[in-house]
Image (cartoon, helix red, strand yellow):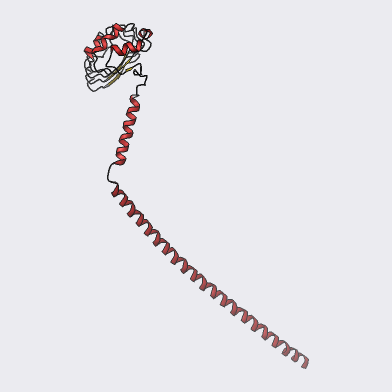
Amino acid sequence: PLQVTELVLDNCRSSNGEIEGLNDSFKELQFLSMANVELTSLAKLPTLSKLRKLELSDNVISGGLEVLAERCPNLTYLNLSGNKIKDLGTVEALQNLKNLKSLDLFNCEITNLEDYRDSIFELLQQITYLDGFDQEDNEAPDSEDDDDEGDEDDDDDENEAGPPGEYEEEDDEDDGASDLGEGEEEEEVGLSYLMKEEIQDEEDDDDYVEGGDEEEEAEGVRGEKRKREPEDEGEEEED
């Protein structure tokens, strides 16, 4: 219990106005939710000096709210929606909660009173929001949205951290090195390509010369055959 900061007991069942196990040992508790636990009174609520948010919706509480200022003096948010609160006299006991900023009384009979909102704001001048809206009907900010905005600001700070000049110089050096490497590769490729072309040209020349020699040899053989044919015919005639 000494390390617990948030405790949700919704839909549990209270016995004689208390929930078993909930006691003064929860000294670090900041958020407590006891919605729909059939709570009839706050007389047995333990002392929770660091408690800031208290959810008591959908119970059967009809009075005795002065206990909150004694046991939970640092409350900033209190939800009493769906309880049996009927008149301004019951709510008046919350004047001693000096840090209270937000109060919810949805579905309580008190909301049917004429000039309900104006009367509550006049009675509890320390509060800013009643049932989720201020006196000008501006909606209360969502605490989760506030946390998200805080995270985004932290991310921006991280992105901006560190001198940008150093990173830019490193990038320039990397670009120069990569350009040089590409140039060397192109030069090597060009030389090897030219050398291959020269080799192929030499091979082609050799093939052409060899082909010419073969043709000359073939023509010589034909000439010899032509010379021999008349001689052979003359010899045959003499015979």
The answer to whether residue 205 is visible is yes
Task: Find residue 72 and report its horizontal and vertical position in percent.
Answer: 23, 15
Q: Residue at x 30, y 35 (%)?
A: 154
> What residue is rendered at 26% in x and 22% in y?
5
Quarter holding residue 207: bottom right
Q: Nearer the viewer, residue 117 or 28?
A: 117
Q: Residue furthest bottom?
A: 238
Q: Would residue 228 be found to the left or right of residue 61 on screen?
A: right
* Residue 157 to residue 89: above or below: below
Name above or below for residue 40 compared with residue 208: above
Residue 12 seen in the current view: no
- Residue beneath the point at 47% across and 66% down: 193
Image coordinates of residue 218 in percent, x first then y, are 64, 80
Q: Quarter-wise, where is residue 45 in the image?
A: top left
From the image, which quarter does the C terminus lie in?
bottom right
In percent of width and height, residue 98 lies at 23, 16
In the figure, is residue 89 to the left or right of 200?
A: left
Q: Is residue 158 above or below residue 41?
A: below
Which quadrant would the N terminus be assigned to in this image? top left
Residue 112: quarter of image: top left
Could you tell me how many numbered marks the image carries? 0
Towards the viewer: 92 or 108: 92
Percent coordinates x, y for residue 14 in the rendering: 31, 9
What's the residue at 45%, 65% (across, down)? 190
